[in-house]
Image (cartoon, grey):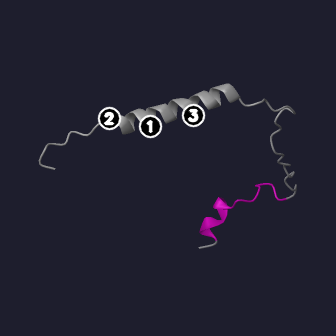
Amino acid sequence: MLVVSSGASAQPQNQNQPAAPTILRPPTSGGTTDEPPKFRMYFTVFVILILMLVANGIPSKRGHQD
């Protein structure tokens, strides 16, 4: 089985020269961070709370036999 699968080896084909290691570095953020848009965040929370209160205030359709 090893003779048949020798072509599927993950090693470099040229054994005389070692493969140069690649150095992986994390991406940079550019050095500055922007402030989050506070007004838009608070407005979104306010709208969601209002929608929840409106949805809670809608009466359910129950008859007199419930």
Question: Label for residue 58?
Answer: 2
Q: In front here: 36 or 18?
A: 36
Question: Label for residue 37?
Answer: none
Q: Is residue 42 left or right of residue 62?
A: right
- Label 2 sits on a secondary structure element that is loop
Residue pictured at 75% horizontal, 59% vertical: 11
Amino acid tagged 2: Ile
Residue pictured at 87% horizontal, 51% vertical: 20
Residues drawn in magenta: 3-15
Question: Label for residue 52?
Answer: 1
Q: Of the residues tagged 3 and 2, which is closer to the observer?
A: 2
Q: Is residue 8 left or right of residue 52?
A: right
N-terminal of the pair, mark 3 or mark 1, is 3
Amino acid tagged 1: Met
Q: Is residue 24 magenta?
A: no
CA–CA distance in space, label 3 to label 1: 11 Å
Percent from the top left, x then y, of residue 49?
50, 35
N-terminal of the pair, mark 2 or mark 1, is 1
CA–CA distance in space, label 3 to label 2: 20 Å
Amino acid tagged 3: Val
Number of residue marks: 3
Mark 3 lies on residue: 45
- Label 1 sits on a secondary structure element that is helix
Q: In front here: 12 or 27?
A: 27
Asked if marks 2 and 1 touch (Cβ < 8 Å), the reply is no
Q: Is residue 12 left or right of residue 18?
A: left
